[in-house]
Amino acid sequence: MSGKFTRRDFIKGLAATGAGVYGLTLADGLIAPARAGSNAQLAVAQGDLSRGADDAELIKRVTREAVDALGGMGKFVGKRSVVMVKPNIAWSRTPAQAANTNPYIVEAIVEMCREAGAKKVKVVDHTINNARMTYGRSGIKAAVKRAKGSMEFIDERKFKEKDIPDGELLKSWIIYADALDADVLINVPIAKHHSLTRLSLSIKNLMGLIQDRENLHTRIDQKLADLSTVIKPDLIIMDAYRILTANGPNGGTPRDVKLTGQVIAGTDPVAVDSYAATLFGLTGDDIGYVRESHNMGLGEISLEAVNIQNIPVP
């Protein structure tokens, strides 16, 4: 058998891991929507699975291809802008355990922001485990240093109460001010199983920007949707290179981790999360906070109404 991985192989693989769950028709470079009426657009870059899960240059290139398909980082990041990058760095886990965002994806994002002319690119998360441990063990601290970004710890003095005028359950909450004040906010979650919400995706990743997370756990789906009315990332880059399929959010054994090789980019959090759900054999409607966010008019839940560009990266 030939050792080459062809473009046709990539497209077949993409259908099997994502769009195929929905039965969408794949064209060369595009999944055409079945109906009009939505402006939502996603870019799904697919890496070469034969190269494994730790090829830094490939993972960075896949990330760049996803962003480039949306018009490039310069479309989102202006000259002299302050950018806040919000990965998931909650847990003291290694990249192979797929509990935190892949460090090479974060590295590529910081590099692209700097190339676009950003004045400062800061990377921060309100972690669950000790931040000094999680930043290091996740590999993200070293990745940000290589990319010449700024790795910052949470400053508790920067949490401020924010009104949520359109919230159904939450009318205000204490939110990290830097996330609201940055010129550009980039949300970089990892797609993974979660014991409470079924999946942890981009909307759930916003919990790393707030205080008093415990009180969010009752009726969490609507509360996350409420938060999404005031925390609005300019760009979402979903790490689905490795996904955690069980024992989330902090992971169990290597059996729980699946290599899918994808990076998903978009600006519609409901559409991004709805696509990511298909990697687990689910739909956006199966995830409560995605469904509630859609009901509040925060994004498109039907992938048939989303333009999904497929980018094989051989």
Image (cartoon, helix red, strand yellow):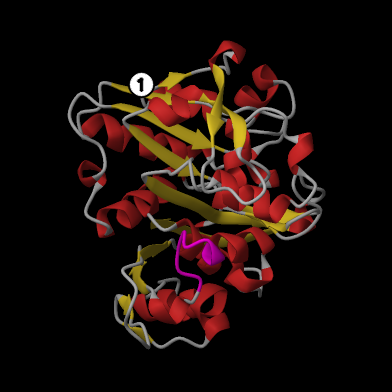
| Residue 202 x/y as whole percent | 54, 51
Quadrant (top left, top right, bottom left, bottom right) of the C terminus: bottom left
94 left or right of 296? right
110 left or right of 296? left
Residue 222 sits in quarter: bottom right
**Whether residue 314 can be seen here:** no
**Residue occupied by mark 1:** 148
| Residue 174 x/y as whole percent | 61, 27
Q: Which residue is at a point 44% across and 50% down the rendered structure image?
A: 237
* Rendered position, 117 above or below 99: above
For this rendering, which residue is in front, 39 or 277?
Answer: 39
Q: Which residue is at a point 67% across and 33% down the rendered structure image?
A: 90
* Rendered position, 73 above or below 176: below
Neighbourhood count class around disc 1 (C-alpha, 10 Å): few under 14, some 14–19, many 20 upward: some
Task: Give the magenta range.
Answer: 294-301
| Residue 11 x/y as whole percent | 41, 78
Secondary structure predominantly adopted by residues drawn in magenta:
loop
Residue 212 sits in quarter: top right
Q: Which residue is at a point 54% across and 40% down the rendered structure image?
A: 164
| Residue 23 x/y as whole percent | 51, 88
**Whether residue 137 can be seen here:** yes
